[in-house]
Image: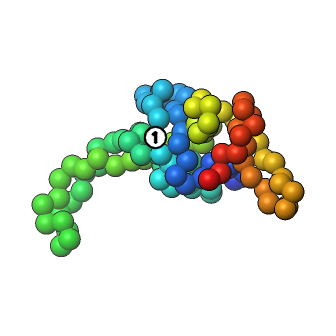
Amino acid sequence: MEAVKIRIKKNDKVKVLTGKDKGKIGKVLKVVKKTSRVVVENINVVKVHQRPTQANAQGGIVDKNMPIDVSNIMVMCNSCVKPTRIGIKQLEDGKRVRICKKCNQQIDS
């Protein structure tokens, strides 16, 4: 399996397009480039059974955010507040920035 170029970064605001959490908006917590997946806050939450350890003597059932495929999410633009595709634009100083394909505004802060 070949890794895909991911234009989504940590702390981006994204909208879920498909699956059980369709329509929800969350913040990206982690990007896993090797598997083309991202972990989004409060999206794809599952119950995980943990056995007791020295750190957690009680053990029990815990909620955990699981990764979601990058094809199932879309970045939210800060200026037009819509889910959008991402373009790359090179500035005069040679720096490359991500832009919104709908309003051509810079996504990077």
Disc 1 marks a residue whose amino acid type is: Gly
Position of residue 67 relative to residue 81, above or below, is below
Apparent side of residue 89 relative to residue 15 in the rendered image (left or right): right
Quadrant for residue 57, please give it.
bottom left
Residue 67 showing in the rendered view? no
The residue lying toward the viewer, choosing from 22 and 105, is 105
Residue 26 coordinates in the image, percent (x, y): 46, 40
Residue 63 coordinates in the image, percent (x, y): 29, 47
Position of residue 94 relative to residue 73, above or below, is below
Residue 8 showing in the rendered view? yes
SS type, badge 1: strand
The residue lying toward the viewer, choosing from 84 and 4, is 84
Residue position for label 1 = 26
The residue lying toward the viewer, choosing from 100 and 24, is 100
Apparent side of residue 91 relative to residue 61 in the rendered image (left or right): right
Specify the farthest residue to the bottom.
54
Q: Residue at image x 78%, y 47%? A: 88
Few, some or many C-alpha atoms within 10 Å of disc 1 (few <14, some 14-19, many ≥20)? many
Q: Residue at image x 52%, y 33%? A: 16
Apparent side of residue 14 relative to residue 96 in the rendered image (left or right): left
